[in-house]
Image (tube, helix red, strand yellow):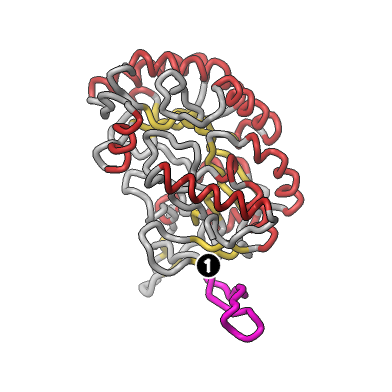
Amino acid sequence: MRWKGWEKVPLDVPDLGVPGGIRTVKAVAPVIVSASRSTDIPAFYGDWFMSRVRDGRVTWKSPFGGDPVHVSFARTRLFVFWSKDPAPFLPHLKALDRLGYRYYFLFTLNDYEGEGLEPHVPPLDERIGTFIQLSQRIGKGRVVWRFDPLVLSDRITVDNLLAKVQRIGDKIAPFTDRLVFSFVDIARYKKVQRNLLTSGCSGAREFTDPEVREFCCGLAEFNREWGLELSACAENRDLLPYGIGRGQCISYDLMVREFADDPALMEFLRPGSQSCLDGTVIHANPEKYLKDPGQRSTCRCIVSRDIGQYSTCPHLCSYCYANTSREVVCRNYSRYREARDRGIFFDSITG
């Protein structure tokens, strides 16, 4: 039994080229929306996001070209927010609650202040405060701590990383249930290699197997005090001997636990049995059936529809795979702010 894709629904969109200025298109209608792996919507584009939610639709543009994808929120039950700084978005939560949407946050909370790898995120203590505030507002089960990615370099050793993780974890462990981390993947992403070199991060490299074991042993020791559910994102190595599972950021288990009172979401997450022509019955494994086909084979995330856009995140983190260049990001963000200040919000982030 395989997932058949999102339902498609008719959607009216503006079109100045046709009589009446409206045309009807076929739009995908996802139950789960990711906002976003590609950019930090809560930090920079909260006003745009809320305008799109109120309008019930968004247009997504692929970084690789092709026709735009129209996305309808007609079936949407859950938003998954990815952010390094959700503080600007907190005032919008009441409006989302009133509209009846469910949501949780994947809060990437790293410590690369000394190395300058995240040049435009707020100070670490401020971000820790935001993490605690958000957890107290929506519940610790709905704020997942991500330390992503773990980077080694001439200046950053395994011991350095363990000290960074411990400093954060000692403060926020009471305010979350989960830690998801990842080991940096430099060889796969040429942009990551280029951006790290441009940032002056000398000797940035991936982990060796002994270094992975060293880090996981240290993390497991910390977690005796924290009691968090630990998982590694998109990781092929078996880390279960350290109490570390395979990561699932858009998580079946989390959704079932936190949003069991949402019947539409639960119906989507728990597909029924399917009868075969020979009379046998196949019982779907929901986590396998709903695995996101758009992600790497090692990613265990449940399927979602991402609505972000590449080259729009002004955090300008040195290890980012989603930004082409600083110049393109600054140009896109400047255009967005100019339109926002005039009360204009495009169908997509960049129009």
Q: Which residues are magenta?
A: 7-27
- Measuring from the top left, give residue 327's x and y in whole percent: 42, 45
Q: Residue at x 70, y 59 (%)?
A: 54
Q: How many marks?
A: 1
**Residue 245 visible from this viewpoint:** no
Q: Residue at x 62, y 75 (%)?
A: 12
Residue 279 falls left or right of residue 130: left
Q: Residue at x 33, y 44 (%)?
A: 298
Q: Is residue 26 magenta?
A: yes
Q: Amino acid at mark 1?
A: His
Q: Is residue 77 above or below residue 326?
A: below
Q: Residue at x 36, y 73 (%)?
A: 278
Q: Is residue 17 above or below residue 349?
A: below
Foreground of the two, 40 or 116: 116
Where does the C terminus fall, quadrant-wise? bottom right
Quarter assignment of residue 42: top right
Other residues around mark 1 within 10 Å, as few (<14) / some (14–19) / many (≥20):
many
Where does the N terminus fall, quadrant-wise? bottom left
Residue 135 falls left or right of residue 160: right
Q: Secondary structure at mark 1?
A: strand
Residue 109 falls left or right of residue 345: left
Q: Is residue 123 above or below residue 315?
A: above
Q: Main secondary structure of the magenta part?
A: strand
Foreground of the two, 287 or 250: 250
- Measuring from the top left, give residue 176's x and y in whole percent: 58, 28
Which residue is outermost to the bottom?
19
Residue 101 falls left or right of residue 191: right
- Measuring from the top left, give residue 207's x and y in whole percent: 27, 26
**Residue 344 visible from this viewpoint:** yes
Residue annotated with mark 1: 70
- Measuring from the top left, give residue 230's x and y in whole percent: 45, 28
Quarter assignment of residue 319: top left
